[in-house]
Amino acid sequence: MLHTTANRRHPSDPPAWRRRAGWGRAALACWLVLAACLQTVHAEDGYDLWLRYAPVEAEVAADYRARLAQVVAPATNPTQRSARDELVRGLGDLLGSAPAQADAPGGAGALLVGTPASLPAIRRLRLELDSLGEEGYLIRSVDVGGNAATVVAANSDTGALYGAFHLLRLVQARQPIDALDLREAPKVRLRVLNHWDDLDRYVERGYSGQSIWDWHRLPDWLDPRYTDYARANASIGINGTVLNNVNANAQILTAPYIEKVAALAGVMRPYGIRVYVSARFSAPMEIGGLDTADPLDPAVRRWWQAKADEIYARVPDFGGFLVKANSEGQPGPQDFGRTHADGANMLAEVLAPYGGIVMWRAFVYSDEEPDDRHKQAYTEFVPHDGEFRDNVLVQVKNGAIDFQPREPFHPLFGAMPKTPLMMEFQITKEYLGFATHLVYLGPMYEEVLRADTHARGAGSTVAKVVDGSLEGHALSGIAGVANIGTDRNWSGSHFDQANWYVFGRMAWDPYLDARAIADEWARMTFTADPAFVEPVVEMMMTSHQAAVDYMTPLGLHHLMGRGHHYGPAPWVEGGPRADWTSVYFHRATKEGIGFDRTTSGSDAVSQYAPPVAEVFNDPARVPEDFLLWFHHRKWNDRTASGRAVWDELVHRYSRGVGQVARMRDTWSGLDEYVDPERHHQVDRFLAIQQKEAKWWRDASIAYFQTFSGLPLPEGEAPPPQSLEYYKSLEFPNAPGNTQ
């Protein structure tokens, strides 16, 4: 079990009333009956995530026990102990009894876990491990002294820990382990969660409670939840965590907070996780007493060098800095007439002696209205390709606007061959229904990673850019904006755990299949019964397209409520910036709808390689999921289905609502396979999603019909309320409201 704290009394523990006088045998008998019933229907709250280690079937367990009867693993340091303890705990829960522990294999069924340096029995096997690097591992069925055994071997203790989790995953999924020969190594070097957590525990765009980092009680109180967090991340290969919001507070760099960061680093270290912080570029002025933060100023450079020295003195394996600069009002080098490369390189220089990394975000747009926000990152960064130091990653969102329900891949991918580019995905569903909408993000991640940039001809996928293989970069990374909080189930809903899980698995290997990962997660999180797994995986795989349909069909984008981003608001206009409004992006008129980014419009298409630009530029060839992203089309123009644009738009809105209804029906019929507590919450959240999907459909159709002036297609129900009603709705207390 994932729990490390005794914060719940087990139903069989003696309650206080049993110690009071006056209660007889009858009362005790009633209690014992009640306790037995409670044990039978033991509630699950989701805290254990995919590490539930629920018992496997008796006949299957017997076979596993015979092959994994004994764990032979060193435990001389915290990482080794973590691997050994995980296997003993996991196999004990899965198989009904814990394997024996030994210093050397003896008899059949030995499980050897470690490195050639840490375990002589592994050294004697003379396994080929060099190609696995520092984090890879091998899992193989071997013969040891004439007895069948299993070995999990690596070049490092962290690699062995990853291998231990992989072996447990095989058992959870009821995979055969009698003839194993697996070799795994991460294809991406940095696999990082970005926490948008403020120091007061508010989580920007987080929908699962407060920040798990209790800064006020740190460094003296280390919540056991931190260890559970580290375990969960290690189980899917995540090796870094950025502790604070990209909209950074300079206080994180003061001595008291460095002590707190060091305490968290100590918890993460045994699980192969480095900590990073988001650095505020103007910190030398705000906490350093300087009158400038100019990256070329010698005093500024000395201040940052001293700060790096201070951090590494407390956190020797500190990962480095994440920086948001010159975006949405955040300070940056441009405030001092310098470039992004100037700013990033100054920080990279002070971190380089310690092996630290700078992750410099490419999500930039100026306070002045640009001609097309889609184009600005490309305009600002491409001229500086090749100018960044070797320990700088430019962190690029998957699309050019801002984590919309669906975006074409960012044009920077493939446009900066001399610079390592780090993918930034969003795990928290800021634009996809928060925590209450079931939207599995695996298909979206897969769609982006498999997109072909044509940077070096056909086959130059985004995945190859991100993992460094396309241009031969040694430094590579994938980041995910986390939705992890103090909610008991970590992510606000049970199915949002799948997005944390699939992010980690695809960060390890961007070429993995989203459906296979969904299958894996469902088996570990709920049950391995195919009668449950197959319909649930199908439901998960259709959920992203459903959300796109009922929110932003045909390439529409940025239609959400102002500030809090909750619910439909395609009518939003006015305010300090045009590109903070919905009307700026959909551009609906009586003639048509869509943003013209073709060569005759904003010309954003020309930021892509010619083969991609030609497709996006042509309304007959562009994928219809991006039709209105790149083209302004007349309401009566025909789409691939033969329907007019207006009719296709309405059809997709309704299709999305219908798919949510089918998801809800599917889940309703699976109650016998899931504990009542989790089944009930998912059912209620699906009811919310169905209601809100219909709200998106009705409000959007009511609004856009005022431009099209066309009747609804035959069989389509009209919105039940007036447009004025939908526009009157206000949500001042919606999660994440920034107004």
Image (spheres, rainbow, N blue to C red):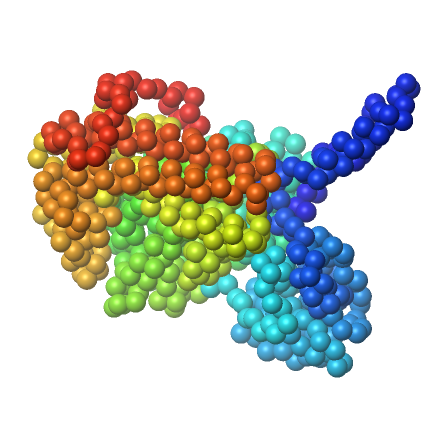
Q: Depth check: give the residue in front, 184 or 359.
A: 184
Q: Depth check: give the residue in front, 290 or 481.
A: 481
- Measuring 32% from the left and 31% from the top, which residue is drawn there? 694
**Residue 602 placement (x, y as % from top left):** 15, 45
Q: Depth check: give the residue in front, 411 or 332.
A: 411
In the drawing, does residue 91 fall left or right of residue 202? right
- Measuring 16% from the left and 51% from the top, which residue is drawn there? 640
In which quadrant is the C terminus drawn?
top left
Looking at the image, residue 455 lies above or below residue 266: below
- Measuring 25% from the left and 48% from the top, which residue is drawn there? 625
**Residue 680 placement (x, y as % from top left):** 54, 34
**Residue 190 placement (x, y as % from top left):** 49, 56
Can residue 190 be seen?
Answer: no
Looking at the image, residue 158 lies above or below residue 125: above
Q: Picture quarter containing residue 690?
A: top left
Can residue 654 be seen?
Answer: yes
In the drawing, does residue 396 fall left or right of residue 283? left
**Residue 401 placement (x, y as % from top left):** 29, 42
In the drawing, does residue 637 fall left or right of residue 236? left
In the drawing, does residue 300 fall left or right of residue 580? right
Q: How many marks?
A: 0
Looking at the image, residue 193 lies above or below residue 367: below
